[in-house]
């Protein structure tokens, strides 16, 4: 950070540009990391105002699946217990090692039974149930957790994918299952996910004639007046990237 500022406005790292479209739809745009979001120790300001201090932190669960295996010697520590040495693949998680559990050598009896090895193993991994020939016998772990945590959020759960090419079988294409042989296919196309989150029926998304930045222009102008020069440049670059999408 090239600027040293002794007096400045404090901005929460959770701050968003907000506005309303002509059709009445609410628009929010995320901000990049700004100098004004951090104190002199490099710690981000998390709370926008004291009024939110008593609000409990929302609980979220993220399940990330990476296929095709891993190089075990670079991933799994050779030591057991809390004093394990961080392996090369886990090194980005070193600052959070006290919150990380690395589980290896785990057996799952549900991975047996019928299947070609991939299908029955995936069924056991994601749901802890046997493969039926078309899918698992019960819900996946993310949906079990979503049933407990997702009731107060707009979306009970979101399934997002990158590639579905693996053999074309249901167990490779779908990680999430709501129940017996009931798949929850992931959204693979970013534009469709964006529309789902922000409203595909809203005028601004249907005709694409107006930028979302037009709706947050007033909030953006107000924020820029409070920012140092470096942050203003960074904000302009960020918003230009959004406009070019």
Image (cartoon, rainbow, N blue to C red):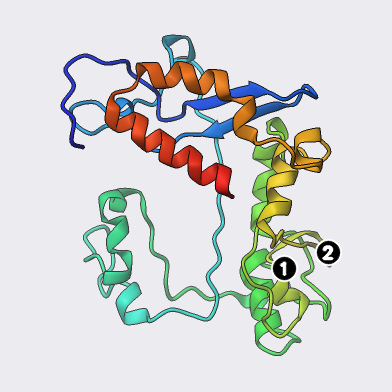
Relative to the observer, which residue lies in front, 70 or 231? Answer: 231
* Helix, strand or loop for disc 2: loop
Residue topped by disc 1: 174
**Sequence order check: which comes first, mark 2 or mark 1?**
1
Crowding at mark 1 (Cα within 10 Å: few <14, some 14-19, many 20+): many
Q: Return the x and y of residue 177 as percentages of the image width and height.
A: 75, 61
| Figure quadrant of residue 148 | top right
The answer to whether any part of residue 221 appears in the image is yes
Circle on res. 180: 2
- Residue at image position (77%, 21%) is 24
Q: Where is residue 56 in the image (x, y as percent from the top left)?
A: 51, 23
Q: Which residue is pictured at 26% across the width and 56% down the height?
A: 94
Above or below, 53 relative to 134: above
Q: Return the x and y of residue 195 as percentages of the image width and height.
A: 73, 45
Circle 2 crowding by C-alpha within 10 Å: few under 14, some 14–19, many from 20:
some
Please tell me in which quadrant of the rendered image residue 163 appears: bottom right
- Compared across the picture, whether 43 is left or right of 198 comes to left
């Amino acid at each position: 950070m090239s600027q040293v500022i002794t007096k400045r406005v404090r901005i929460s790292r959770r701050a968003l540009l907000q506005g309303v479209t002509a059709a009445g739809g609410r628009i929010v745009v995320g901000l990049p990391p700004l100098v004004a979001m951090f104190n002199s120790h490099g710690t981000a300001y998390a709370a926008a105002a004291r009024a939110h201090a008593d609000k409990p932190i929302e609980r979220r669960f993220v399940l990330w699946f990476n296929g095709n295996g891993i190089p075990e010697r670079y991933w799994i520590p050779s030591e057991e217990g809390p004093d394990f040495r961080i392996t090369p693949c886990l090194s980005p998680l070193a600052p959070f090692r006290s919150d990380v559990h690395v589980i290896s050598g785990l057996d799952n009896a549900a991975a047996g039974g019928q299947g070609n090895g991939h299908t029955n193993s995936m069924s056991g991994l994601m749901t802890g149930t046997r493969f039926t020939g078309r899918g698992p016998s019960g819900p996946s772990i993310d949906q079990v957790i979503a049933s407990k945590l997702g009731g107060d959020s707009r979306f009970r759960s979101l399934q997002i994918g990158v590639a579905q090419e693996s053999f074309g079988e249901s167990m490779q294409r779908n990680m999430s299952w709501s129940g017996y042989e009931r798949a929850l296919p992931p959204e693979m196309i970013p534009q469709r996910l964006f529309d789902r989150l922000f409203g595909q029926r809203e005028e601004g998304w249907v005709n694409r004639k107006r930028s979302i930045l037009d709706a947050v222009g007033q909030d953006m102008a107000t924020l820029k007046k409070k920012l140092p020069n470096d942050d203003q440049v960074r904000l302009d670059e960020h918003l230009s990237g959004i406009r070019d999408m």
